[in-house]
Amino acid sequence: MKRRNTPTKEAVLSVLESTAKAMSQDAIEKKIGIDINRATIYRVLNRFCDDGVLHRIVADDGKQYFALCMKCDDHQQLKNHFHFRCKVCETIECLPIPVHFSLAKEYEVENVNCVITGVCKDCGHDKKYD
Amino acid sequence: MKRRNTPTKEAVLSVLESTAKAMSQDAIEKKIGIDINRATIYRVLNRFCDDGVLHRIVADDGKQYFALCMKCDDHQQLKNHFHFRCKVCETIECLPIPVHFSLAKEYEVENVNCVITGVCKDCGHDKKYD
DNA sequence: TCATTATTGCGATTAAGTCGCAATAATACA
DNA sequence: TGTATTATTGCGACTTAATCGCAATAATGA
Ligand SMILES: [Mn+2]
Ligand SMILES: [Mn+2]
Ligand SMILES: [Zn+2]
Ligand SMILES: [Zn+2]
């Protein structure tokens, strides 16, 4: 299963590198410019997740969102972090807030998925000129 | 919009009162005994959520799960708590672990959805007689 | 250049959840 | 107790997200 380099992979990655947010397949497809099949985008995203290049967030809207995994040491500590989904601008941001919990040792943790939903700082309700 | 008492409502509630876990529409339908339409179960569940009787968790499998909201003061502090989804027994439990985070005041929080996924204490990998 | 096989496009498919509408039944009230 | 009001239900159609099978394409290494 050796990976091959393709224009599709590079295009998807480049879209995600152009933002600090997590994006859905739909949003990526809209922003990507070139025409790539939906199933292909999903397959590329899933492979990136398998390879540890991206992480997947399932929000409370039931949709999957994908974001780059940070590699520098500063960010590595944030392996499990909170996410914020804004209902107004429909974006998901990776928050620099680590998730802490402690479970009885019999539990085996495989994934942590934490999403806070509401209105983000850029869309606050007091904004008069929306 | 005054609520009416119906056998359906009572049946759904009784299923959820019979367990400490969160359940999906599918699981509820299987356990409920009487034959109730899928859309109706969803409508009942949604109404219970609106009324604060149930809370809804969206897990990383993309599905919605519903659990009773505890009313005693002991549990009220756990308004936002972690959930654990076991991939083996396919259940979701409400953990008595509160979710803590702090956001810049410009954020408006409307919902908190935290799910840890893995293998629960009853399904541990060392079990030889599964 | 050629063979291998990972990747892609396409259409069909699955699954969760919602919606419109007509029929039913819980509630309030005469 | 009868009747009107309207919340609730059942049904089927629909929506959306995501996956899958398969044949065609193209990246890679020899
Ligand atoms: Mn993130
Ligand atoms: Mn819970
Ligand atoms: Zn926003
Ligand atoms: Zn389990």
Image (spheres, coloured by chain):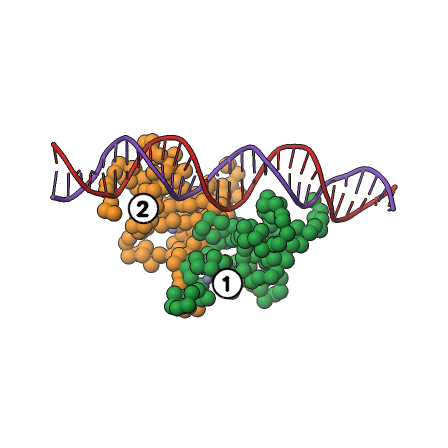
Chain colours: A orange, B green, C red, D purple
Residue A42 location, quadrant: top left
Q: Which quadrant does the N terminus of chain B fall into? A: top right
Question: Which is nearer the eye, B122 or A117?
Answer: B122
- Residue plotted at (58% across, 51% down): B29
Residue bearing the label numbered 2: A47
Figure check: B14 above or below D23: below
- Residue plotted at (38% across, 58% down): A110
| Residue A51: numbered disc | none
Question: Which is nearer the eye, A70 or B95?
Answer: B95
Ligand 1 neighbours mark 2 (CB distance < 8 Å): no
Question: Which is nearer the eye, A8 or A75?
Answer: A8
Q: Position of residue D13 (x, y in %)?
A: 56, 32
Figure check: A117 above or below C21: below
Q: Residue type at mark 1: give it.
A: Leu
Ligand 2 neighbours mark 1 (CB distance < 8 Å): yes
| Residue B95: numbered disc | 1
Q: Chain of mark 1?
A: B
Q: Residue type at mark 2: give it.
A: Arg
Secondary structure of residue under mark 2: helix
